[in-house]
Amino acid sequence: MRIAVLGTGVVGRTIATRLAGLGHQVGMGSRTADNATAAAWVQQTGAGSTHGTFAEVVGDAELVFNCTSGAGSLDAVRGVGAGNLAGKVLVDVANPLDHSHGMPPTLLVCNTDSLAEQLQRELPETKVVKALNTMSALVMVEPGRVPGQHDVFLCGDDDAAKAMVGEILRSFGWPDRSIVDLGQISAARGPEMYLALWLRLYGALGTGDFNIGVAHR
Ligand SMILES: NC(=O)c1ccc[n+]([C@@H]2O[C@H](COP(=O)([O-])OP(=O)(O)OC[C@H]3O[C@@H](n4cnc5c(N)ncnc54)[C@H](OP(=O)(O)O)[C@@H]3O)[C@@H](O)[C@H]2O)c1
């Protein structure tokens, strides 16, 4: 599949590398065409990988991952243009963290709205699916790093888009029973607000190799 990954940070690089390893053609996007991190990633990854501006890598991609900073995500997709993202599935992995008041960061949007909903409103013809934002980058693409049964959440308004993202998650190693569909895109408020707890758990446990496992009968 042709996949665009918007973002050159640890999440963008980790997801892009995993997707390329699975045989997908991956383009890594940045604000600038000559981003050194993206260029180095292409050099390392080799055939089938490309890099460019956010708009360039979206091009004819069938699937797009938003791995930009939460504060920059709306600007990133505005740079691509709603028309260029129309009809595509956008997996939103970002968290709307506000680092301007020091540590720990707070949320730029919460409670009655979410970043995923803002993106969906900005891109009415795009199928936004929130997924993977509740864990560290390495756990996203290699769930076996965390022992035992644990879960990944997804939500969005389009069932076919969620099915497509579910396939990608299975290819990352997530078993069916661990992929929990929370419903419509408004359900993204919960996984985004979980960040307040994730950050404290990270401090308490001293590792990013942990995740939520929902016990139920
Ligand atoms: N780190 C984790 O383990 C983790 C886990 C779960 C979710 N997340 C979320 O995943 C996202 C990516 O995290 P990260 O740590 O990999 O990287 P990050 O440092 O949060 O974001 C880096 C990317 O954001 C772009 N960016 C920054 N400011 C921008 C702006 N004003 N307009 C447009 N684009 C902008 C950068 O563009 P350039 O390439 O041009 O510099 C870069 O590609 C974040 O939303 C984060 O909250 C992170």
Image (spheres, grey):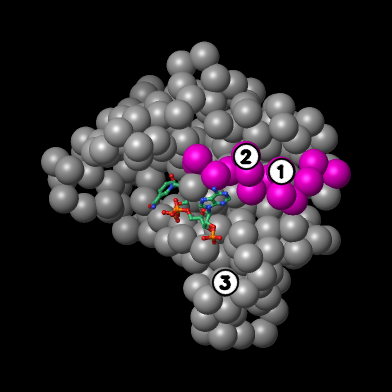
Q: Residue 152 location in percent, x, y?
A: 46, 40
Verify CB contact (< 8 Å) between mark 1 and mark 2.
yes
The C terminus lies in which quarter of the figure?
A: top left
- Checking the image for residue 78, the label placed there is 1
Q: Earlier in the sequence, mark 3 or mark 1?
A: 3
Residue closer to the observer: 163 or 155: 155
The residue that label 2 is drawn on is 74
Callout 1: SS? helix
Q: Amino acid at mark 2?
A: Leu
For the record, the magenta segment spans 70-83
- Checking the image for residue 35, the label placed there is 3
Residue 206 highlighted magenta (yes or no): no
Callout 2: SS? helix
Q: CA distance from mark 2 to mark 3?
A: 20 Å
Residue 78 highlighted magenta (yes or no): yes
Instruction: Give the residue at x 36% y 24%.
Output: 216
